[in-house]
């Protein structure tokens, strides 16, 4: 994934924005240009096969199989990067998540001694966020990386985001966040610990909340060069600005979500790689109608045209 992230939290397939264009989270390679390369174009094609054990995230699960062919176009320069992603999502047993999702982003990179500043903006249309929502998103973000040693980095992030829900306009609104990560390398392995605080300011009070996200991730090579096995655990407690009835009392709605995910990336040839993802997601809540359990497995074949 940047992480384990979208339906399960393992970062995107090829770009920052791609996590918003597919329901299946994928490990993301570094977006930094290769040393010595002033500029380069990259074009990737992918096909994801996914089984979702609870696609609607409801107490009564609806199981679904999905296909998501996609493409990603990216231009990299030492101090600038932009890209475009598109995915065609189709699922069985539901048509709610059938859509063409798109994302476009740009990042400007500046360096000052041990610091690297990444200023970015992105727009996603009908993308899937970590909340599995069919929203359009408009965001401006800042990411600061402090290189402590050759093995350790401290990363601070923040974003101003506006989420638009065309089918339910009252739930539209700002959803900013701030976060930090500590990244430690052990040879070819990596350990990352992170925290993020997010709020949602929708027009409808029922959808406003404050969320804390705690993550720990570990990745390592297994068998061949450039393969990677990764694990991530995420815990997300959040409180809504909405009172619900529990027994004879009215209390704030509170949720706790836990996601455990694993992925394996294996190169098949210089241009082709396979990605397997498995995840378990559970949400507990003092509102019984919001509880669910969702197992997911997926496989993606990726072809790099250039």
Image (tube, rainbow, N blue to C red):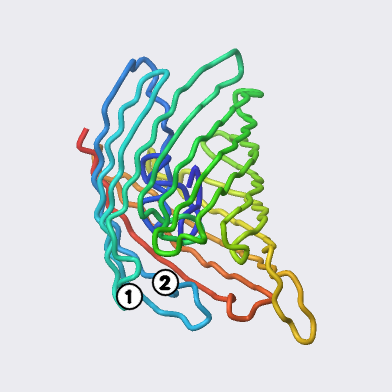
Residue 64: x and y in percent read: 35, 74
Figure quadrant of the C terminus: top left
Which structural element holds mark 2?
loop
Q: Determine the residue positioned at 47% across, 71% down.
A: 295
For the residue pair 152 and 146, the one nearer the viewer reads as 146
| Marks 1 and 2 close (CB-CB < 8 Å) | yes
Whether residue 301 is situated above or below residue 305 in the rendered picture: below
Secondary structure of residue under mark 1? loop
When asked about the image quadrant of residue 146, the answer is top right
Q: Residue furthest bottom?
A: 247
* Residue beneath the point at 49% across and 59% down: 8
User: In this figure, which residue is indicated by the disc labeled 1?
Assistant: 94
Mark nearer the N terminus (1 vs 2): 2
Return the x and y of residue 199 as percentages of the image width and height. Answer: 63, 51
Q: Is residue 253 left or right of residue 86?
A: right
Q: What label sits on residue 55 in the rendered view?
A: 2
Indicate whether 74 appears above or below 8.
Answer: above
């Amino acid at each position: 994934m940047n992480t384990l992230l979208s339906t399960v939290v393992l970062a995107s397939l090829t770009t920052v924005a791609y996590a918003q264009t597919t329901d299946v989270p994928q490990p993301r390679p570094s977006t930094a240009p290769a040393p010595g390369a002033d500029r380069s174009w990259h074009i990737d094609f992918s096909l994801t096969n996914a089984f979702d054990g609870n696609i609607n995230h409801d107490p009564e699960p609806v199981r679904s199989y999905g296909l998501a062919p996609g493409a990603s176009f990216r231009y990299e320069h030492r101090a600038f990067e932009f890209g475009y992603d598109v995915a065609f999502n189709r699922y069985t047993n539901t048509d709610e998540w059938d859509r063409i999702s798109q994302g476009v982003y740009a990042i400007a990179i500046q360096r000052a001694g041990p610091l690297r500043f990444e200023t970015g903006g992105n727009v996603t249309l009908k993308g899937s966020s970590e909340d599995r929502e069919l929203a359009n998103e408009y965001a401006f973000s800042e990411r600061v990386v402090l290189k402590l040693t050759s093995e350790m980095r401290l990363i601070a992030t923040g974003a101003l985001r506006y989420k638009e829900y065309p089918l339910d306009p009252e739930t539209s609104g700002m959803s900013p966040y701030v976060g930090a990560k500590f990244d430690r390398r052990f040879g070819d392995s990596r350990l990352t610990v992170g925290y993020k605080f997010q709020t949602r300011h929708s027009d409808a009070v029922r959808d406003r909340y404050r969320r804390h996200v705690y993550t720990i991730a570990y990745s390592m090579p297994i068998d061949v060069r450039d393969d990677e096995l990764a694990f991530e655990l995420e815990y997300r407690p959040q409180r809504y600005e909405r009172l619900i009835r529990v027994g004879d009392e009215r209390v704030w709605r509170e949720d706790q979500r836990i996601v455990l995910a694993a992925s394996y990336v294996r190169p098949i040839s210089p241009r082709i790689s396979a990605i397997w993802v498995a995840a378990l997601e559970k949400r507990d809540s003092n509102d019984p109608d919001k509880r669910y359990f969702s197992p997911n497995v997926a496989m993606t074949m990726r072809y790099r045209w250039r």
